[in-house]
Image (cartoon, rainbow, N blue to C red):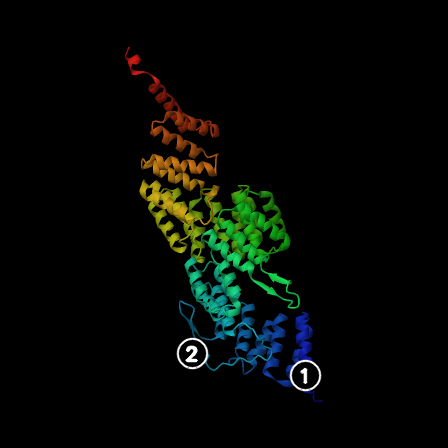
Amino acid sequence: MKMREEEIEKLRGVVRDCLSKHLYSSAIFFADKVAAFTSDPADIYMQAQALFLGRHYRRAFHLLNASQIVLRDLRFRYLAAKCLEEQKEWDQCLLMLGDAKVDEHGNVNDTKDCNVMYLDKEGEDREINISSAICFLRGKAYEALENRAQARLWYKAAIKADPLCYEALECLIENHMLTSEEEASLLSSLQFAPEDGWLSSFYSCLIKKYDKETVVEAKFTELEKQSCNINPSDPSFICTLKNNTDLLACKAEYYHQCGEYQKCFELTAILLEKDPFHMKCTLVHLAAAMELGHSNELYLMACNLVKDYPQKALSWFAVGCYYYCIKKYDQSRRYFSKAANLDGTFPPALIGCGNAYAAQEEGDQAMLAYRTAARLFPGCHLPTLYIGMEYMRTHSFKLAEQFFMQAKTICPSDPLVYNELGVVAYDMKEYNKAVWWFQKTLSHIPSSLSEMWEPTIVNLAHAYRKLKMYHEAISFYEKALTLSIRSLSTYAGLAYTYHLQDNFPAAITYYHKALWLKPDDQFCTEMLTLALVDEARRGVDPRNESR
């Protein structure tokens, strides 16, 4: 019995419909019959696709590998490699994808693939370049083989081959494979189609955001204005990205980066009501809750995540955050380690582990965690920064300075790095240098000054006081008091500066304010006594004293 072409085409339609309805066994059954009737490479590919989606990876690979076209049609080769990926046969996966070289800029030199075909009868008008997908798969294979340097190059090649390959950019950003400058450089090199201007803007919001507040807010505003009229007959029916969850999650991440934790927490809370399982938003929400000390919120989040996603690193990271927040560092370290073991490409888990060790002053273990994070995530400056902080704790100031400078190279626009450089210069008694670094810190703060930066202003005032520049010191102490009125260090510093200027009444006033915050402070108690004695002496007439 010979089937007519229209009957075969009808069967192909049945296969496609079964796949769209996730009826994979039915799809495999009918695809097998279509391929038997026609022996057409496109139908063999459709059968392999049905087998792959039905999780019959070995059978799909065998079918593709048995066809003579597998090494000449990129679709066949790519799907065969995907089968090997699912079986975690990474070396074989790379062999199937073929030999190719990639340079530091993500440009591919592939001489052996010059005679390949790409046959796709069902191709969409706008599809992702198959070469981009192949580059991305190579990157995943190299990352699984722990060759992160090659993985980084292939991910760059994937996004350069087709800017629509978002997964490649996501891996580069989420796994901190690029420095902030490299991210910006890569983004500027992408060739977007004229209609993809919005995508370019969106990508610019995804990368590290250490620009000034006006610059970043302008990016968000530009994206929020992007609109699309999906109903031409009704001009008022316009859709925008203004309330898009991904975009708002980026904005929340920026607020967290600026130290506006309450603002960040409020935004993520609203977003999680709308989309409770948005993973990026969940991570930012956890970070904000940690900074604000909301242990109850962390407990609820951790319980829900462990219940819904027991195999995800984020779930156990949330448990670690809860224990860290309530200062149970042993338990927090255990859960951070569990998160890191579940997903070796999850930076917060390793950094959290290091922080838990550091909180218990277990420096060697903290250093080990930070060094591992620095090696695995070369684009993240935080592990290097924390290594410097650990050296500061042990008074190894020169080593600390080296690591802070290294962190500055990775991320030259994070104000926290400049603050730590100022602190280490101050501790080495290089006060002019300290002033310079603290001033650089203030110039790099992206938004208006908040309480988060009060210690930097106080440190700057201390440095000015050490240089005997008392008027400048007093000016910055007073500026610090506008941000926080409950800082012992500020009142004590201001009192001592007035004392050095022989302005005893002002000194006495501020020593009293400092002691109101901490009545048993030894320095302020002793200096208050001296100031009172000095004031009493100055109030005695020398002529009367001589009698």
Q: Disc 2 versus disc 1: distance between alpha carbons?
A: 38 Å
- Res 231 quadrant in image: bottom right
Q: Is residue 10 above or below residue 414?
A: below
Q: Residues within 10 Å of mark 2 (few under 14, many from 20)?
A: few
- Residue 420 x/y as whole percent: 39, 45
Q: What residue do we see at 42% from left, 45% from top?
A: 363
Name the secondary structure under disc 2: loop
Determine which of the numbered discs, if any, sits on residue 329 in the image. none
- Residue 496 x/y as whole percent: 37, 30
Q: Quadrant of the C terminus?
A: top left
- Residue 439 x/y as whole percent: 37, 45
Name the secondary structure under disc 1: helix
Q: What residue do we see at 69% from left, 71% from top?
A: 23
Res 338 visible:
no
Name which residue type carries label 1. Answer: Ile
- Residue 498 x/y as whole percent: 37, 30
Name which residue type carries label 2. Answer: Thr
Q: Is residue 171 left or right of residue 25?
A: left
Q: What residue do we see at 70% from left, 84% from top?
A: 7
Q: Is residue 426 above or below residue 236?
A: above
Q: What residue do we see at 53% from left, 64% from top?
A: 198
Res 259 visible:
yes
- 92 or 219, which is in the foreground? 219
Q: Is residue 448 above or below residue 530?
A: below
Residue found at the very far top of the displayed protein: 547
Determine which of the numbered discs, if any, sits on residue 111 in the image. 2
Check if mark 2's residue and mark 1's residue have beta carbons within 8 Å: no
* Disc nearer the start of the sequence (2/1): 1
User: Which residue matches tag 1?
Assistant: 8
Q: Is residue 100 left or right of residue 315?
A: left
